[in-house]
């Protein structure tokens, strides 16, 4: 029997990447053979992002590219999965006709079943005869009529009452690091955000399951474990009646084989003294924290429904800096939120200037259909949004460049990702201040170094956001 070939495109955030790796694992178990090139594949799967408009346009662009290959006979079938599929559901078929199946976020466990049907459809008669409809349809039998195209080609499941397991993943990250999703969904209901509508309410993954997945990843060679969720600090509240992130992190610290534990998406509430102490004292937790703040003005925070104010935020930052002297803080801000005045933007600039964040991302407000903020008055013109974004990033650039210059001459530990493709004898590595893909790199010079090595290095230079370093020893 000939192996069925498939290509896979994964878009979006690390949480989506975990879903992609789970689907890849399911397909490998079902006998599918992954090909690096869509051209010639029996089927292409696109795991999409639907978070904001630029991400949606990127996803639609990839879908149309794959459909063009299908029309030329170079791809058998096109299956669209993930957040864009969940958000648009059957309307997506009208926007990109020719897609063979769409699979919602929680339909991922049946991805092999969907691909089997998609390939069978392509080898069958193309007209919608009765037998062909039955061949391609997923879901309950329509009584007394032929199913609609949407019924025929869609697979959606309700949000689970417990988090889906993420074991048996075919990982697409380098072998030495992996993302570990500890919960699904979000209860925050920020007015600008559509994620709860795509991913559902927050559902904590039990501690025992998280540890089982962490051990599996460690046994597969993972040295850096990157903890992700829509909201990591909320972990445990729905399942156990209290937040239990600190306890989970201490248990992850005991997993043999892991060396670094990095935490992303930690919202600025539910930061208990226990959690701060755990971050400061747990040996494998790197002094890095990703904490999306979005703004600092109290009126706008209330309008965003962030449930935190400036005084509380500044107190938390002070406590974290005091407890973890080497802490690298990453945050994100939204500028141009409806009603944001010039004075409120200036307040945000002053806060960023004073806080000296090591890493900052700034995004113009994206109007998201179906969110409460869509109905807010006083929208800020796009040109003003972009100007504010550029100005805040210029301010932050000076802060970030000053931080890199301060590192010159210091020793630090870095994890090696790969050889530097531009400079022979050099490697691309990351320090504690650098999460994969979103932060900066350390260009490391040394011999006898491989991807995944932890290297003690001396910083020899600063190049904008990036560092140059010389390897001292490998461990």
Image: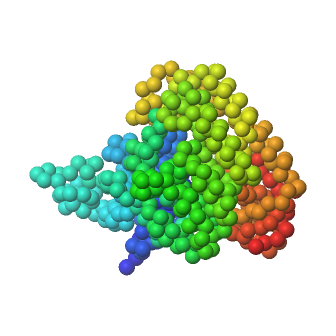
- Please say if 372 is above or below 21: above
- Tell me what residue is drawn at x 75 percent, y 51 percent: 325
In the displayed orientation, state which residue is furthest to the bottom.
1
Q: At which x and y percent is residue 394?
A: 73, 34
- Tell me what residue is drawn at x 66 percent, y 68 percent: 259
Q: At which x and y percent is residue 277?
A: 64, 55
Whether residue 187 sits left or right of residue 120 in the image: it is: right
Q: At which x and y percent is residue 387?
A: 66, 27
Whether residue 149 sits left or right of residue 342 in the image: it is: left
In the displayed orientation, state which residue is furthest to the front.
273
- Please say if 432 is above or below 58: below
Q: Nearer the viewer, residue 352 or 105?
A: 352
Please tell me how many numbered marks the rendered image carries: 0
In the displayed orientation, state which residue is furthest to the left.
144
Displayed quadrant of residue 204? bottom left
**Residue 107, can we see it?**
yes
Whether residue 378 sits left or right of residue 358 in the image: it is: left
- Tell me what residue is drawn at x 60 percent, y 37 percent: 312
- Tell me what residue is drawn at x 66 percent, y 27 percent: 347
Q: At which x and y percent is residue 96?
A: 39, 45
């Amino acid at each position: 029997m000939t192996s069925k070939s498939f290509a896979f495109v994964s878009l979006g955030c690390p949480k989506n990447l975990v879903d992609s790796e789970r689907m890849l694992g399911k397909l490998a178990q079902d006998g599918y053979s992954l090909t690096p090139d869509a051209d010639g594949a029996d089927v292409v799967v696109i795991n999409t992002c639907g978070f904001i408009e630029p991400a949606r346009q990127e996803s639609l662009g990839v879908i149309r590219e794959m459909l063009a290959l299908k029309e030329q006979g170079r791809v058998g079938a096109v299956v669209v999965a993930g957040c864009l599929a969940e958000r648009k559901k059957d309307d997506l078929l009208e926007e990109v006709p020719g897609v063979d199946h769409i699979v919602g976020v929680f339909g991922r466990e049946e991805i092999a079943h969907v691909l089997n049907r998609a390939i069978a459809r392509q080898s069958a008669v193309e007209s919608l005869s009765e037998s062909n409809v039955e061949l391609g349809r997923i879901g309950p039998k329509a009584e007394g009529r032929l199913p609609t195209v949407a019924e025929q080609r869609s697979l959606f499941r309700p949000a689970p009452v417990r988090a889906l397991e993420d074991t048996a993943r075919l990982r697409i990250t380098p072998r030495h690091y992996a993302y570990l999703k500890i919960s699904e969904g979000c209860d925050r209901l920020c007015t600008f955000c559509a994620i709860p509508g795509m991913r559902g309410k927050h559902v904590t993954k039990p501690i025992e399951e998280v540890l089982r997945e962490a051990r599996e990843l460690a046994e597969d060679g993972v040295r850096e474990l990157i903890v992700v969720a829509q909201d990591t600090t909320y972990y445990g509240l729905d399942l156990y009646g209290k937040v239990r992130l600190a306890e989970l992190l201490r248990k992850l610290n005991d997993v043999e084989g892991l060396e670094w534990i990095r935490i992303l998406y930690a919202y600025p509430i539910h930061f208990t003294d226990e959690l701060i102490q755990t971050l400061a004292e747990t040996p494998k937790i790197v002094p890095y924290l990703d904490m999306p703040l979005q703004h600092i003005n109290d009126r706008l925070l209330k309008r965003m429904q962030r449930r935190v104010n400036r005084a509380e935020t500044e107190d938390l930052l002070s406590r974290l800096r005091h407890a973890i002297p080497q802490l690298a803080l990453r945050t994100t801000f939204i500028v141009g939120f409806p009603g944001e005045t010039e004075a409120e933007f200036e307040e945000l600039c002053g806060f960023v200037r004073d806080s000296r964040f090591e890493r900052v991302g700034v995004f113009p407000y994206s109007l998201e259909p179906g969110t409460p903020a869509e109905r807010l008055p006083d929208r800020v013109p796009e040109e003003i949004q972009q100007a504010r974004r550029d100005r805040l990033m210029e301010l932050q650039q000076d802060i970030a460049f000053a931080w890199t210059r301060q590192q010159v001459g210091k020793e630090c530990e870095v994890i090696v990702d790969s050889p530097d493709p531009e400079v022979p004898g050099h490697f691309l590595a990351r320090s504690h201040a650098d999460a994969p893909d979103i932060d900066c790199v350390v260009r490391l010079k040394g011999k006898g170094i491989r991807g995944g090595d932890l290297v003690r290095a001396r910083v020899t230079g600063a190049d904008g956001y990036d560092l140059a370093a010389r390897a001292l020893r490998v461990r």
